[in-house]
Image (tube, rainbow, N blue to C red):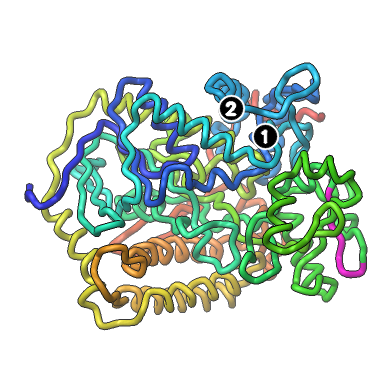
């Protein structure tokens, strides 16, 4: 092995320091493994902090009739039954214990009068099920996990980007990375890896996601030979800020609707009465997002192309207590007092239901030694995620992935690393400095425009075909992208690598969306508006073959009778 790389060894390497990565790290440490957590941003800067509304868990603190079976049923029904049913079952069964564990580790929750954790209503959930801390739940979750991880002695490599997983004899062996500050290379030798890098929102121009969300983990797994699944299901959160332009896409938590917020069009009509008269504003996200989009398209949108979300009918003190972040967000960013006037909101690219295909119990991908948890792993949410399920997802499956990765590491020896793979990774990283192409920023802007306009909330064959053609051209442009300056603090250089990830994942999304000739959950085809029973029986799988993005299909395994009975039971 060459000597010019910094080398670190860990039993388990974790890529991503959000809720899923930290929960996996805590569990792997508890199993006695040596753990390294790599994140391309700073610790505490994860997307988990943006999950404001709460953690979905059937604790029955507010609605005594709630139990895991109802939560399972809600999750399956929200996901249009495309979910991995075993993941949905484990999630519903284990979420309450994971919340109690957080509480033991010092998380502070809002309380009922008798001191139990308070729970609120949320779209698609039958009962009040979201354990919350005002509208800053994700922040409290990250604070708690981070404190726990640091106290247990996790090694954290911040502002470090992994660009390639190293594979030896058909299994994971290590990772090639670089320090963002100085561009120096670092190699991680490890026996197992947990990918917990979140989603892909930065491939769209209007998104609640910040700069980190470029699909890196999914692309790393795909390039190492793992399978991706159900990539067409990208969730557009119904309510992001639409004005002023500088804050477009910033999330307006569903808790606003959970606490009684009402959606109206510019004529003052409460339009959800038309689209889902039973659940109204608390319908599932796919339905609410499409309803707002339709109102705007048919000319009933607000001045800046959205809808009004109004909570001002509630007492001002109640709003400030229940939704402190939203009150400050609108006051500071849009000069709107939400206790007196409505917010202007519209759909924003928010969450990825698809991702790395994993086993329910262990979170292991189709490639030995590569595990995934949280948003970058597919299966739990099916065709559409219910609000609040993402935080319980990352706790339940972060823990399981950490445990399974540590168990695998105990039985595995370190592999020797192949020099050629590392030299290829280095060559690829340095190419932009000698390329003669264009700036990566121009390519990224064009990619966002194409994904926003052609692979957005509503899709059709003609748009998707155009998008695929554009993506092929972007790939050629990205391969020739050029950067100036040195490797020190060079954001343009970082973007070249992220562009590669975004282009792989954007193509996976578009090819899967093209194939799925039906509308289901977050995937809406104008040319195929109905559910197709045949498509309800199978998943889209994406694999790499000879450097190409190739789509296959995989049948959904039959559900056991006891779970069928749970689904059939009426509330």
Q: Which residue is mark 1?
A: 133
The reply, left or right, for residue 377 in relation to residue 519 is left
The reply, left or right, for residue 3 in relation to residue 174 is left
Residue displayed at 39% across by 36% down: 364
Residue displayed at 18% across by 64% down: 427
Of residues 7 and 24, the one drawn nearer to the viewer in this rendering: 7
Of residues 291 and 23, the one drawn nearer to the viewer in this rendering: 23
Of residues 132 and 182, the one drawn nearer to the viewer in this rendering: 182
Report how far apart the C-alphas of labels 2 and 1 lie in the structure. 9 Å
Q: Which residue is mark 2?
A: 107
| Residue 562: percent from left, percent from top | 65, 23
| Residue 458: percent from left, percent from top | 66, 67
- Asked if disc 2 and disc 1 are in contact, CB closer than 8 Å, the reply is yes
User: Which quadrant of the view contains residue 216?
Assistant: bottom left
Does residue 558 appear in the picture of this structure? Answer: no
Give the residue furthest to the top: 114
| Residue 477: percent from left, percent from top | 35, 78
In the rendered image, the vertical position of residue 556 relative to residue 307, given as above or below: above
Helix, strand or loop under label 2: loop
In the rendered image, the vertical position of residue 232 relative to residue 37, given as above or below: below
Of residues 426 and 494, the one drawn nearer to the viewer in this rendering: 494
Give the residue furthest to the left: 2
In the rendered image, the vertical position of residue 29 relative to residue 340, given as above or below: above
- Locate the C terminus and report the quarter of the image it occupies: top right
| Residue 441: percent from left, percent from top | 42, 74
**Count of numbered tags:** 2
The residues colored magenta run 261-267
Does residue 185 appear in the picture of this structure? Answer: yes
The reply, left or right, for residue 276 in relation to residue 67 is right
Residue displayed at 56% across by 69% down: 205
Residue displayed at 44% across by 56% down: 215
């Amino acid at each position: 092995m060459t000597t010019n790389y910094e080398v670190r060894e860990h039993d388990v390497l974790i890529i991503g320091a959000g809720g899923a990565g930290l929960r996996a790290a805590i569990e792997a440490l508890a199993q006695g493994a040596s753990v390294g957590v790599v994140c391309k941003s700073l610790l505490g800067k994860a997307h988990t902090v943006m999950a404001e509304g709460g953690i979905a868990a059937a604790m029955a603190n507010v609605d005594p009739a709630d139990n895991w079976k109802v939560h399972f049923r809600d999750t399956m029904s929200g996901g249009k039954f495309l979910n991995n049913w075993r993941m949905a079952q484990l999630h519903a069964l284990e979420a309450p214990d994971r919340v109690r564990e957080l509480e033991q580790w010092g998380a502070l929750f809002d309380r009922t009068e008798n001191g139990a954790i308070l729970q609120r209503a949320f779209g698609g959930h039958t009962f009040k099920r979201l354990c919350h801390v005002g509208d800053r739940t994700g922040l409290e979750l990250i604070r708690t996990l981070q404190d726990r991880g640091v106290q247990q002695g996790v090694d954290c490599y911040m502002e470090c980007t992994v660009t390639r997983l190293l594979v030896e004899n058909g299994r994971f062996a290590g990772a090639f990375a670089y320090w963002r500050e100085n561009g120096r290379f670092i190699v991680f030798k490890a026996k197992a890896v947990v990918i917990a890098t979140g989603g892909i929102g930065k491939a769209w121009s209007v998104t609640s996601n910040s700069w980190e969300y470029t699909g890196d983990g999914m692309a790393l797994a795909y390039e190492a030979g793992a399978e991706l699944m159900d990539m067409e299901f990208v969730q557009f959160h119904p309510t992001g800020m639409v004005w002023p332009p500088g804050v477009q896409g910033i999330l307006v938590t569903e808790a606003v609707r959970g606490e009684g917020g009402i959606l109206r069009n510019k004529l003052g009509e409460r339009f959800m009465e038309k689209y889902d008269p039973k659940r109204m504003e608390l319908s599932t996200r796919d339905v609410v997002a499409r309803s707002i989009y339709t109102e705007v398209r048919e000319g009933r949108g607000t001045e800046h192309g959205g809808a009004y979300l109004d909570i001002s009918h509630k007492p001002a003190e109640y709003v400030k207590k229940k939704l402190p972040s939203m009150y400050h967000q609108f006051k500071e960013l849009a000069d709107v007092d939400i206790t007196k006037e409505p917010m202007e909101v519209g759909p924003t690219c928010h969450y990825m239901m698809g991702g790395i295909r994993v086993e329910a119990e262990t979170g292991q991908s189709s490639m030995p030694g590569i595990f995934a948890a949280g948003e970058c792993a597919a299966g739990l949410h099916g065709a559409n995620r219910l609000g609040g399920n993402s935080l319980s997802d990352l706790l339940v499956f972060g823990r399981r992935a950490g445990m399974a990765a540590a168990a695998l590491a105990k039985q595995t020896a370190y592999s020797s690393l192949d020099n050629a793979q590392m030299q290829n990774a280095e060559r690829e990283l340095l190419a932009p400095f000698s390329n003669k192409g264009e700036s990566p920023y121009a390519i990224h802007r064009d990619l966002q425009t194409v994904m926003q306009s052609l692979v957005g909330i509503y899709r059709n064959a003609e748009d998707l075909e155009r998008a695929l053609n554009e993506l092929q051209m972007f790939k050629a442009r990205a391969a020739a992208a050029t950067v100036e300056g040195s490797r020190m603090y060079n954001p343009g250089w970082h973007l070249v690598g992220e562009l590669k990830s975004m282009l792989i994942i954007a193509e996976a999304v578009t090819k899967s969306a093209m194939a799925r000739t039906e509308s289901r959950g977050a995937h809406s085809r104008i040319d195929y508006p109905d559910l197709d029973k045949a498509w309800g029986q199978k998943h889209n799988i994406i694999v790499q073959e000879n450097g190409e993005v190739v789509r296959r299909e995989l049948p959904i395994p039959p559900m056991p009778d006891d779970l069928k009975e749970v689904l059939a039971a009426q509330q």
